Image (cartoon, rainbow, N blue to C red):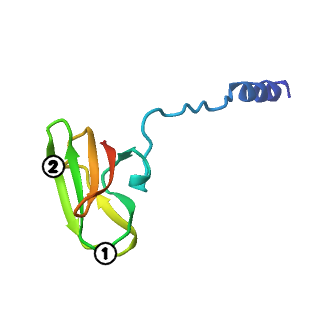
Amino acid sequence: MKKYLIFLLLIVLSCQKDELEPIGGIEREDMIFAVTESKVVDGQTIFFNILSEEEHTLIIFDEETQSVVAKESFQPRVGLFDRRIYTKSLPKKRLQLILKTTEELEKTYINVD
């Protein structure tokens, strides 16, 4: 019996509560233009609101080199719109994501991992 009590005492004393540390930095956000900066991963679906049915262009822009990294034009419907973003061909750094028609509608920064 004494062995069982010692064994039980060892089990209780050896158990510890997990320490969860908050991860600093940028959070991943699927409503991409709702924040000023977010982290994106390969294959992530991003969502944004469309207010008109005219042709829209989604541009990924590198401010360091002042060049367009990727550009896609599409004809959307009004409302919530989604696009899948693939990051394997993008440089691993902070880029600017711009939504525009004839004028710039929305912009945010994305961190590619």
Which residue does the numbered mark 2 point to in the structure image?
68
Judged from this view, the residue extending furthest toward the front is 103
Q: Quadrant of residue 104?
A: bottom left
Residues 4 and 10: in front is 10
Q: Amino acid at mark 2?
A: Val
Q: Is residue 38 left or right of residue 20?
A: left
Residues 13 and 63: in front is 63
Residue 75 vs 87, above or below: the answer is below
Q: Which residue is at 32% across, 45% downward? A: 110
Q: Which mark is residue 66?
A: none
Residue 99 vs 68, above or below: the answer is below
Which residue does the numbered mark 1 point to in the structure image?
53
Q: Amino acid at mark 1?
A: Glu
Task: Estimate the x, y position of residue 112 in percent, counting from the top left.
Answer: 29, 43
Task: Estimate the x, y position of residue 59 in percent, counting from the top left.
Answer: 22, 55
Q: Is residue 16 left or right of residue 47?
A: right
Q: Which residue is at 49% across, 34% downward? A: 23
Q: Which residue is at 25% across, 73% downward? A: 75
